[in-house]
Image: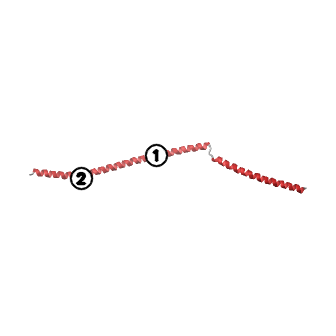
Amino acid sequence: MLKRYVARVEAAHKESQLKLQQLRAIAARKNRTVLLLSRKIDEVPTHSELAQYGRMLVELYEQINSKFVETRKYYNTFNALDDTRRFLEREVSIVKSINDQLSVAKSVVAVVFIHGFVSFVGMETR
């Protein structure tokens, strides 16, 4: 009788241990699910974090805009100076051309003057 009682107690103990293992497995799965969901919740930024991100984006936009305005100013300055350089090069070219033509004209005028003077002097002596 005692053996049967001990056997029943051992059977009940094994059954209880099996149930305990099953319940621990269920609890572990639920724990993993809870942990996964809490991680997903933590990934979502809070209102204050979103506001901070917004402020940082506005600051970044202002910095980029400031750099853009500065860069545009430098481009405009460069283009104005480049235009001035090109106009001055044209002016130098025109002045050189005038100078070349003037020296040619002086020599032609001198030849014509001398020829005219010789003709004039030649007519007077006759």
Asked which secondary structure carries label 2, the reply is: helix
Q: Position of residue 42 (x, y in %)?
A: 65, 47
Q: Amino acid at mark 2?
A: Val
Q: Residue furthest left?
A: 126
Q: Position of residue 56 (x, y in %)?
A: 56, 44
Is 92 on the left or on the right of 8, as rendered?
left
How many numbered markers are drawn?
2
Q: Residue furthest right?
A: 1
Asked which secondary structure carries label 1, the reply is: helix
| Colour scheme employed for the rendering of this structure | secondary structure
Nearer to us: label 2 or label 1: 2
Q: Amino acid at mark 1?
A: Glu
Query: Which residue in the protein does label 1 denote?
Result: 70
Disc with the residue nearer the chain's start (2 vs 1): 1
Q: Residue at x 28, y 51 (%)?
A: 97
Q: Residue at x 58, y 45 (%)?
A: 53
Is 67 on the left or on the right of 51, as rendered?
left
Q: Position of residue 58 (x, y in %)?
A: 54, 43
Q: Nearer the viewer, residue 38 or 52?
A: 38
Query: Which residue in the protein does label 2 denote?
Result: 104
Is 63 on the left or on the right of 5, as rendered?
left
Q: Residue at x 19, y 53 (%)?
A: 111
Q: Position of residue 79 (x, y in %)?
A: 40, 48
Q: CA distance from mark 2 to mark 1?
A: 51 Å
> Considering only vertical position in the picture, is 58 above or below 2?
above
Residue 10 occupies which quadrant of the picture? Answer: bottom right
- Which quarter of the figure is the N terminus placed in? bottom right
Tell me if mark 2 has few (under 14), some (14-19) or many (20+) residues whose alpha carbon lies within 10 angstroms of its own: few
Is 13 on the left or on the right of 76, as rendered?
right
Tell me if mark 1 has few (under 14), some (14-19) or many (20+) residues whose alpha carbon lies within 10 angstroms of its own: few
